[in-house]
Amino acid sequence: MEQSENPLWRQKIYEARHLGAIRLERHRLGNHDGVKDSYRTMLQLLSAAA
């Protein structure tokens, strides 16, 4: 079944939201490399959504 643009966009929003939560947890735990990596991952996610 083919998904329309709206569900795909919503999926990307949820992925970005989840990544934001992961970033906060990494920051809380002092995982600075993980926080830095989350910015790269977010860039890739947003680039794919555009």
Image (cartoon, rainbow, N blue to C red):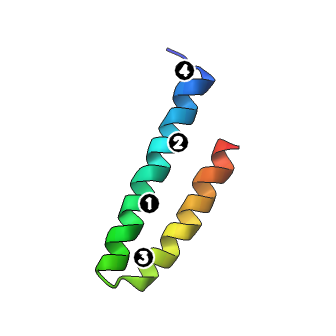
Q: Nearer the viewer, mark 4 or mark 1?
A: 1
Disc 1 packing (10 Å; few <14; some 14–19; many ≥20): some
- Give the CA separation, mark 3 to mark 1: 12 Å
Badge 3 marks a residue whose secondary structure is helix
Q: State how far apart marks 2 and 3 are (Cα).
A: 20 Å
Q: Residues within 10 Å of mark 2 (few under 14, many from 20)?
A: some
Q: Secondary structure at mark 2?
A: helix
Q: From mark 3 to mark 4, how far is it between C-alphas? A: 32 Å
Circle 3 is placed at which residue position?
34
Q: Quadrant of residue 5?
A: top right
Q: Residues within 10 Å of mark 4 (few under 14, many from 20)?
A: few
Of all residues, the one furthest to the top in this rendering is 1
Image location of residue 33, percent across then percent down: 45, 82
Sequence-first tag of 4 and 1: 4
List the residue tagged with mark 2: 12
Which class describes the residues within 10 Å of circle 3: few (<14), some (14-19), or many (20+)? some
Q: Does residue 34 sit above or below 44 in this rendering?
A: below
Which one is in front, 45 or 13?
13
Q: Amino acid at mark 3?
A: Gly
Q: Secondary structure at mark 4?
A: loop
Q: Residue at x 50, y 73 (%)?
A: 37
Q: Secondary structure at mark 1?
A: helix
Residue 24, percent across and down? 37, 69
Residue at image point 49% right, 14% down: 1
In this rendering, position of residue 50 left or right of residue 21: right
CA–CA distance between discs 2 and 4?
13 Å
The mark closer to the camera, 2 or 4, is 2
Mark sitting earlier along the chain (2/3): 2
Name the residue carrying label 1. Answer: 20
Residue holding disc 4: 3
Given the image, on which type of amino acid does mark 2 rest?
Answer: Lys
Instruction: Identify the residue shown where x is 28% and y is 80%.
Output: 29
